[in-house]
Amino acid sequence: MTSGLPCPVCEGPDRRGSLERSLRVLAVDDEAPALEDLVYLLRSDPRIAHVEAVTDATKALRVLHRAMDAGQPLDAVFLDIRMPGLDGLDLARVLSRFAQPPPVVFVTAHQQPAVEAFELKALDYLLKPVRAERLAESVHRIVHEVWDSKAPAESAPAAQQQQQGAPPEVGDEVIPVELGGVTRFIRLADIRYVEAHGDYARLHTATGSGLVRAALNGLEERWRSAGFVRIHRSHLVSLGHIDELRLEDGHLSVTIGGAVLPVSRRHARHLRQLLVRRARPIVPPAGQGQSVPTAPQPRNGLGS
């Protein structure tokens, strides 16, 4: 704080003592000496418990997603602006589209991008070389952001909506995926289904697919409120992208954009219930005469 006076918010009876070693942050800078200096200063602050350090934006996105998948999202990102490839401003734009974007503090030797940085709603803008007292002000701002996000945020109408079972609103998250050594960015709303690949998951869209290092269980929990549901130990699907639910020879499957995915018995009942709520037709096997009146005429085979 610039005034040197105790902060009435931080020093409140319900918060005093709870701020020490509580923050988890990420530092991003392509210059090793600058990154080392920043990490040293951050670790010296008594309010910071953990510091991750990476040298480029792609690695930063991986760290952020890994933390979210583990249920421990980072509290803030200290971000250099001028970096090769995806620069700091580009990364900040990607982060702004996260469902819950972390606060961003830009750390740079250049004053020129300051206006653009604050247009991206940066929490703070530090000039190199970073002074310890100036960094402490940024950490103080992060503390307030963290406390504000933990405060009861539900208004009465929102609470009523949750009680009535209405799905919560989900932001249009952006996910970095690997494809042939290239990192692409895809929107959560464009993902049709997810396929397990060991320690990775393959995200399928209308235009292709890409790998992300994440477990299917973590993605299921994280994207449930966005309309994703588990149908098999190897598949997670977006309800809004399902074209058909088919029952043939006692086996249930869904069709999504031409792909036919099996539904395990364990998940079949829950999936049916969800689709009925969305008024999705169920297509029985051809010739059994069990068509729902609103369902399209069954076709030969699962994928034809």
Image: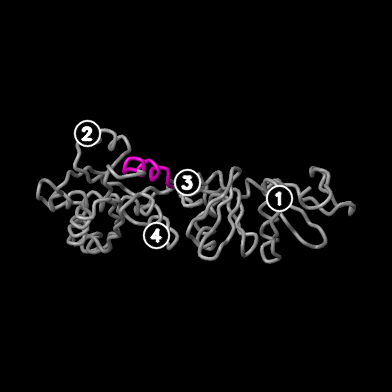
Residue that appears at 34% across and 52% down: 151
Instruction: In this rendered view, identify the residue nearer to me: 185 or 148.
Output: 185
| Front tag of 3 and 1 | 3
Spatial CA span between label 3 and label 4: 20 Å
The residue where tag 4 is placed is: 67
Spatial CA span between label 2 and label 4: 32 Å
Q: Are marks 2 and 1 in contact (CB under 8 Å)?
A: no
Q: Note whether 200 is above or below 81 in the view shown.
A: below
Instruction: In this rendered view, identify the residue nearer to me: 290 or 9.
Output: 290
The residue where tag 1 is placed is: 255
Spatial CA span between label 4 and label 1: 32 Å
| Front tag of 3 and 2 | 3
Q: Counting residues from the N terminus, which is met first, the one under dot 4 or under dot 1? A: 4
Residue that appears at 44% across and 47% down: 99
Q: Amino acid at mark 4?
A: Ala
The residue where tag 3 is placed is: 184
Per the rendered image, the range of residues in magenta is 87-98
As helix, strand or loop, the secondary structure at mark 2 comes to loop
